[in-house]
Image (spheres, coloured by chain):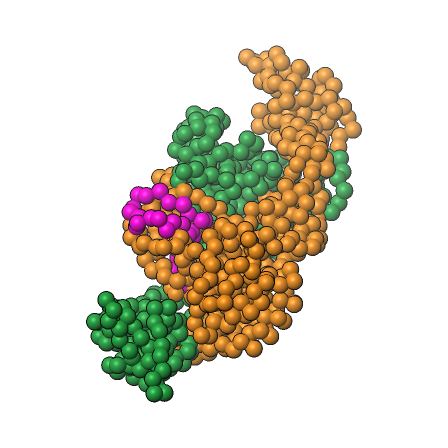
Chain colours: A green, B orange
Amino acid sequence: MNGNQESVDHKFQRRALQVSEAQARITEVANVLEFEDVPLNQSCGRYLAERVIAPHPFPAFNRSGMDGFALQAADIKNCGNGNRVWLEIVDNIPCGAVSTVEITTGTAARIMTGAQVPEGADTVVMLEVTETRVTAGITYVGISKKQDAKRNITPRGQELSQGDLVLPAGGMISAGEIAVLAAFGMDMVKVHRRPKVGIFATGTELLEVHEPLQPGKIRNSNSPMLEALVRETGGEPIMLGAIVDDLELARGKLKLAMENYDFVITTGGVSVGDYDIMGDLVREQSGDMLFNKVTMRPGSVTTAAVREGKLLLALSGNPGACFVGFQLFARPVIGLMQGAAQPFLPEWTATLGADYPKVNNYTRFVRARLEIREGSLYAFPATLDESSVMVTIKDSDCLIIVPPEERGLTAGAKVTVLKLPGEIRG
Amino acid sequence: MNGNQESVDHKFQRRALQVSEAQARITEVANVLEFEDVPLNQSCGRYLAERVIAPHPFPAFNRSGMDGFALQAADIKNCGNGNRVWLEIVDNIPCGAVSTVEITTGTAARIMTGAQVPEGADTVVMLEVTETRVTAGITYVGISKKQDAKRNITPRGQELSQGDLVLPAGGMISAGEIAVLAAFGMDMVKVHRRPKVGIFATGTELLEVHEPLQPGKIRNSNSPMLEALVRETGGEPIMLGAIVDDLELARGKLKLAMENYDFVITTGGVSVGDYDIMGDLVREQSGDMLFNKVTMRPGSVTTAAVREGKLLLALSGNPGACFVGFQLFARPVIGLMQGAAQPFLPEWTATLGADYPKVNNYTRFVRARLEIREGSLYAFPATLDESSVMVTIKDSDCLIIVPPEERGLTAGAKVTVLKLPGEIRG
């Protein structure tokens, strides 16, 4: 199957693809971008371009887990029941120091939590259960309880051996990864650069956010939403404004955007009306179209094309459809460009929390809110989930997938949900 | 109960507080910071300082949901069964335009998706089921099927009426909120400023991340981790480095930090050893101590103080304890300073996925990984969860709360978990 076959000359007769097929087509041409090295403290939210192998064991030395005394367990094996042993204190080992004194039978070293256990010692007795005395100028520690070897000592390599896989390639870096990378001395991190994503809107009805409302017009809310979504996904949004419905203007804008950025996302102009210029633009160069109809609601008119290796995703101007289209198609593209190992939304099973009576001929992606109740996951569909509806986007943390064969769903049904990024709000 | 009573002069005899009491003490003195106005496109991740009320209905006009023809439903009520009606096309309404022609019986207007429905029309018939003809220079649209009033028209105010509460104060702003704020023309957003959080570490054993490993020493991984956590929580981290275990040095550093920043977080020096300088510093000014022992593992030595209204949180130097202490105490403080309505970690019930045999005298916060299986939430405890362990932080998306009375837990038990920020990894 190639792109030409799906391109037909009549606007109403687009060949519809399944969502999974459309996703496969667009992600297939999403290429991972070049490497770059970023400082560790700027690497949060990026994806590791290479796996990380432990360059040394961690911890790198036998470490005391207590403030106390390092000694030989054999020396105190008869302690207890009033039987106390006194050991000569031969060293005092703070953190960061290395003792030059070997612990032999009858001796002990004062040691701090986190310090390297001296040679010869095989156990650390906590400070709180010891006492000290000075006899003839020599200080002794008294121990009244026996204790096994290895107690309160974290052995070299307990967490990781040299050569262990620490972090796989393609994983996102957050605070826990930062700690590991820091511990292994990696103050620069190799990642793939962020894609530059050009964003513009089409529609003569669009006002800038700061403009006063005018009759028949609406403020352009999709562009700022897409900007936030691109940034959240790790891309670098470049805002190219909104243009009126003019084919020439749009053609120029699109050409410029495709030349200068890694990925172009537009909103508006993909429907079947007289002013649906993005649809026209893609149709006129049919060879590079990936799809222009998807069997989904909202956003069936979502359109994608590739031109000289650059991707265009033309989303609906309806806010709900624009949002869903971004999550299904733009998010994996932006993730893959950064080398993300798992660029798609996680798919979970949940229990439907309320009836969803609507019947569809296409698969529906219903905005919904998740809740964890007594260890079970519930999804509550938004009361307003039409393509044109904007206000419920903010209340949604998942999309319920309602297949076309469903004849309405009742509360309690098992449903598949796509988890949206961010915290569960319920 | 006041702070003085808990402060005792012997290091070993700290008075331990329950986690909830310690949280109450530290959050009680966390004050919300001043207002500032930020541009909408910089507001993601911030918390709304004021609720948002709809300044106008949304949508602001009756909007066509289809490309087609706006007309009066009464004119086509007899259509169907071969009965077709022809209406004169009196206008063509693109998006953003306002028709000056009122639709009367026998007339229709061509209209685009998203355009304002003209006066007099009460339904929109989709383009795909119409035909047109020209007779004597006049263009007519033919309709062969009846359709009720209100079809394909989104009424003014469908999503929000003027005066409706759109967004509550204290909610976090993400892409969906951005869309709403944009739609209502709010290109500047009132938020509370981000707290400046001074971070330093104490410990003679600490190397900088870029330094080669030395015997007995470790790289400072807690500071970069805390930096990432503070940023993730919306704070502005100021990195003050690491100092050796020297009381005078620490006193000076702390004084400077408390004077210059909104909140100071330290790591290390709070245990009972000879070099536990942060503990000493807080004890020497006992009047402002909030707590210096909490009945929790890891991190029982977590210490907090307030001085001239500024908060100090002294976390353990053990990575696991440092991480848990941040999540329980620093996160709500940083959230509250920004006016977050829900600054604490969400608490969920989950099913334990594997045995957890350890027995504790204190409540344990066990690092764990969540998984959704068939609509149920499972928590798998990390195999290494000691205070000193760093490597499992990255694999954890929740903390299982194991109360002290538990005598070990078996797989299948119901447990309470605190959800950590970020995506569920399972």
* Region in magenta: B390-419
Q: Residue B168 location, x and y as percent?
A: 63, 41
Which residue is at 59% across, 59% downward? Answer: B235
Q: Nearer the viewer, residue A79 or B329?
A: A79
Asked whether, in this view, residue A304 is left or right of residue A100, the answer is right
Asked if one can make out residue A244 in the rendered structure from this viewpoint, the answer is: no
Is residue B397 inside the magenta stretch? yes
Q: Splitting the image into 4 quarters, where does residue A168 fall?
A: bottom left
Q: Residue B253 location, x and y as percent?
A: 59, 73
Image position of A70 with respect to A227: above or below: below
Asked if one can make out residue B187 in the rendered structure from this viewpoint, the answer is: yes
Q: Residue A30 location, x and y as percent?
A: 47, 55
Is residue B240 inside the magenta stretch? no
Q: Nearer the viewer, residue B37 or B328?
A: B328
Image position of A355 with respect to A70: above or below: above
Asked whether, in this view, residue A277 is left or right of residue B228, the answer is right
Image position of A84 with respect to A135: above or below: above
Q: Residue furthest bottom?
A: A136
Which residue is at 50% across, 61% downward? Answer: B292
Callout count: 0
